[in-house]
Image (cartoon, rainbow, N blue to C red):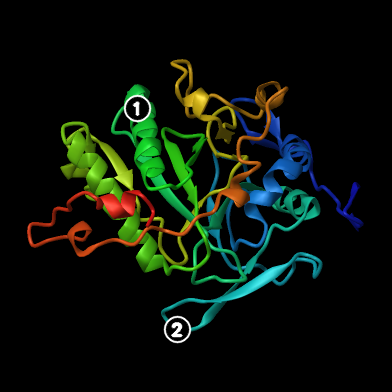
């Protein structure tokens, strides 16, 4: 019965197998989240939580849970937000290691969090590009991420990257808390359109999967109120327990990188001797460059490139 952050937490049935093919138990999951908390907490603190729960392990029923249950102890922080369709909902917040351990004991394998914090829920402080490949050609994902980084640097925005623990990469940009989700989405869409125009045979922003024709999907649709993204250092409910881990851009240049290569079994070896590549993220926030009318969709649905003035950040 560990005492964490002054809170006594009973881990029930720690021997329960959560990943049957790999023998990973609930006790292993609890231990992982307790150990990773120092790195994970700065990235999730204050962000409304969406829990991906598996009471019987990953072979059983999956529960997508947003609302915090009444049974949760009062020391777990919560946030009540507008549903934008009438009513409100109260989410849990992961603000300390004790909450992470409690959630793991609650059979949460994966944490998903908002792109805004509770201090300003309508105003995101992160922008995300989800690079979703059509096949196993991860070279294209890596190449696209690096091209996106260069494009964002031209706009004086600093890009960070993480593996998803699944098939792709997330390119994440810290931004000043100011614009609305709508403004952020329009901006992200303009950047994605510009990048796809440079390589239309391999890249697309087409939402309908059947129309992508084998191309990599640059998804910007998570840049919306109430949408979530897999939290950094979160475990995915997949074979071997892959981890969505922040990585350095030098890792993206490595041919050996895999989006699901860091797992619960090897994560500590991976982190050994590595600085946290997202440690300085909060200091790198910058305002979004304004889009000119020529950057927005014209009647043909296409976008032109951002202006020289916008690229210079003026």
- For the view shown, which residue lies furthest in the top direction? 256
- Residue nearest the viewer, comparing 176 with 312: 312
Q: Quadrant of residue 194?
A: top left
Question: Could you tell me which quadrant the C terminus lies in?
Answer: bottom left
How dense is the environment of label 1, judged by Cα within 10 Å: few (below 14), some, or many (20 and up)? few
- Residue 263 visible in the shown view: yes
Asked whether, in this view, residue 297 is left or right of residue 141, the answer is left
Q: Going by the picture, which residue comes out furthest to the left?
A: 300
Q: Which numbered disc covers residue 123?
A: none
Residue 126 in picture, x, y percent from top left: 50, 55
Q: Is residue 190 above or below residue 74?
A: above
Q: Earlier in the sequence, mark 1 or mark 2?
A: 2
The image shows residue 132, relative to residue 219, as above or below, that is above
Q: Residue at x 54, y 70 (%)?
A: 121
Tell me where residue 8 sits by quadrant: bottom right
Residue 236 percent across, percent down from the top left: 55, 39
Figure quadrant of residue 271: top right
Q: Residue furthest bottom?
A: 86
* Circle 1: element type: helix
Identify whether 139 is placed above or below 71. above
Q: Is residue 126 above or below residue 129?
A: below
Contact between marks 1 and 2 (CB within 8 A): the answer is no
Q: CA distance from mark 1 to mark 2?
A: 43 Å
Please state which of residues 11 and 272 is positioned toward the viewer in this rendering: 272
Whole-percent x and y of residue 292?
Answer: 24, 62
Identify which residue, 6 or 283, lies in the foreground: 283
**Residue drawn 22% across the image and 40% down it:** 196
Q: Which residue is mark 2?
A: 86
Q: Is residue 50 left or right of residue 290?
A: right
- Identify the residue at horizontal 72%, vertical 22% (top origin): 273
Location of residue 60 in the rendering, given as x and y in whole percent from the top left corner? 55, 43
Query: Which residue corresponds to mark 1?
Result: 143
């Amino acid at each position: 019965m560990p005492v964490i952050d002054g809170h006594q937490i009973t881990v029930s049935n720690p021997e329960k197998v959560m990943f049957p093919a790999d023998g990973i138990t609930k006790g292993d999951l609890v231990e992982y989240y307790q150990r990773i908390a120092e790195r994970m907490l700065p990235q999730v603190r204050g962000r409304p939580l969406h829990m991906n729960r598996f009471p019987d392990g990953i072979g059983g029923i999956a529960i997508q849970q947003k609302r915090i249950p009444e049974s949760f102890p009062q020391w777990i922080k919560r946030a009540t937000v507008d549903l934008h369709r009438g009513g409100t909902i109260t989410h849990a917040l992961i603000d300390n290691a004790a909450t992470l351990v409690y959630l793991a004991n609650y059979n949460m394998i994966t944490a998903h969090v908002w792109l805004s914090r509770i201090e300003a829920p309508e105003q995101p402080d992160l922008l995300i590009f989800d690079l979703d490949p059509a096949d196993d050609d991860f070279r294209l994902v890596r190449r696209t991420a690096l091209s996106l980084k260069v494009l964002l640097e031209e706009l004086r925005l600093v890009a960070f990257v993480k593996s998803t623990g699944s098939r792709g990469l997330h390119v994440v940009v810290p931004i000043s808390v100011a614009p609305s989700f709508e403004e952020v989405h329009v901006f992200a869409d303009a950047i994605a359109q510009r990048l796809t125009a440079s390589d239309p045979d391999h890249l697309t922003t087409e939402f309908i999967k059947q129309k992508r024709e084998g191309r990599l999907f640059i998804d910007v649709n998570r840049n919306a109120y109430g949408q979530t993204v897999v939290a950094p250092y979160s475990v995915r409910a997949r074979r071997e327990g892959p981890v969505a881990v922040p990585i350095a851009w030098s890792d993206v240049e490595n041919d050996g990188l895999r989006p699901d290569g860091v797992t619960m079994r090897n994560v500590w070896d991976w982190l050994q001797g590595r600085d946290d590549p997202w440690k300085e993220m909060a200091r790198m926030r910058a305002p979004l460059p304004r889009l000119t009318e020529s950057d927005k969709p014209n009647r043909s649905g296409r976008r032109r490139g951002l202006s020289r003035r916008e690229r210079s950040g003026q």
